Image (tube, grey):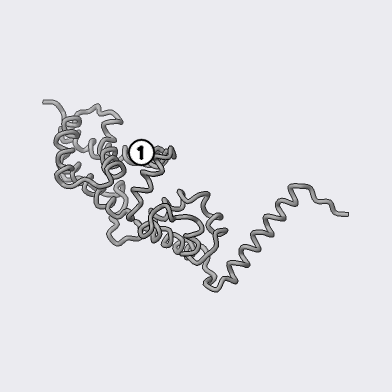
Amino acid sequence: MLVLDKDDVIIELRNTRSLMFEEKEKKSPNHSRRRGDELKKAIYKAAVHILENEGYEKVTFQNVAKEAKTTRSVLYRYWDDVFDLIFEAVRFNISQNPEWRGNVIDQEINSGSLRQDLIELLTFMRENFKLYPKGFLAFVSFMQSQGKNVLESTVGNVLPSNLIIMERLLARAQERGEAREKIGQTAKLLPFQMTRYHMLLEGQSMNDKQINELVDEVLLPIYIKNT
């Protein structure tokens, strides 16, 4: 007699459940055997649509699955929670926008003037931030208020690239004799931190006047070489 231990039974149950989910997905009247990228795109589109039109409270696996014409089991295969789904959907949505100008780290910002470089950097980021879907900033603020450490987990991933961007700008300024040699990490990250402050805490991006004031009254006094 073949005897299965507890682990074998659990594995078999999981495999059976997975097959049942796949069969249910195939038989769904609205299902067109979507797989891989096509299915994910439909899920992203559904999540962003609900976020923009009904608010982040309505972005649940159940509602997204219904909007995307799939099953909740499919979503659970890809994401652990709605938080991860929303962030991934928003990133994809922005990348597909024809107004998306690419990642700032890939841009060549070199006007020959530190002041102009900083203005161009901040303006570039502002235009990209405008592409965030309606309701996303409110969602981020809510998650932060619930102690989810959204800023820490997301910003921590971009700090290295932020430093690279500023070190490029400042290195050129130092070669031109504009910037002082020793500038700390906190000072280098200020343009990005201030941008995130306006976006996440004030709910809006900086206008031209605010950008100019930040550059002239805060950043340049820190970066400029004393004569």
Name above or below for residue 39 compared with residue 188: below
In the rendered image, residue 116, in percent from the top left (x then y), is placed at 15, 43
Q: Residue at x 21, y 48 (%)?
A: 123
Q: Quadrant of the N terminus?
A: bottom right
The secondary structure type at the circle numbered 1 is helix
Q: Quadrant of the C terminus?
A: top left
For this view, does 138 lie left or right of residue 88? left
User: How many marks can you see?
Assistant: 1
Of the pair 205 and 96, the residue shown nearer to us: 205
Of the pair 197 and 56, the residue shown nearer to us: 56
Q: Residue at x 34, y 41 (%)?
A: 161
Q: Residues within 10 Å of mark 1 (few under 14, many from 20)?
A: some
Which residue has dot 1 on it? 159
In the rendered image, residue 102, in percent from the top left (x then y), is placed at 31, 53
For this view, does 76 lie left or right of residue 5? left
Q: Residue at x 75, y 52 (%)?
A: 9
- Furthest toward the left, the residue is 227
Q: Residue at x 22, y 45 (%)?
A: 122
Using the rendered view, name the quadrant where residue 171 is placed: top left
For this view, does 34 lie left or right of residue 175? right
Q: Amino acid at mark 1?
A: Leu
In the rendered image, residue 193, in percent from the top left (x then y), is placed at 29, 38
Of the pair 219 and 21, the residue shown nearer to us: 21
In the rendered image, residue 14, in percent from the top left (x then y), is placed at 67, 55
Of the pair 168 and 64, the residue shown nearer to us: 64
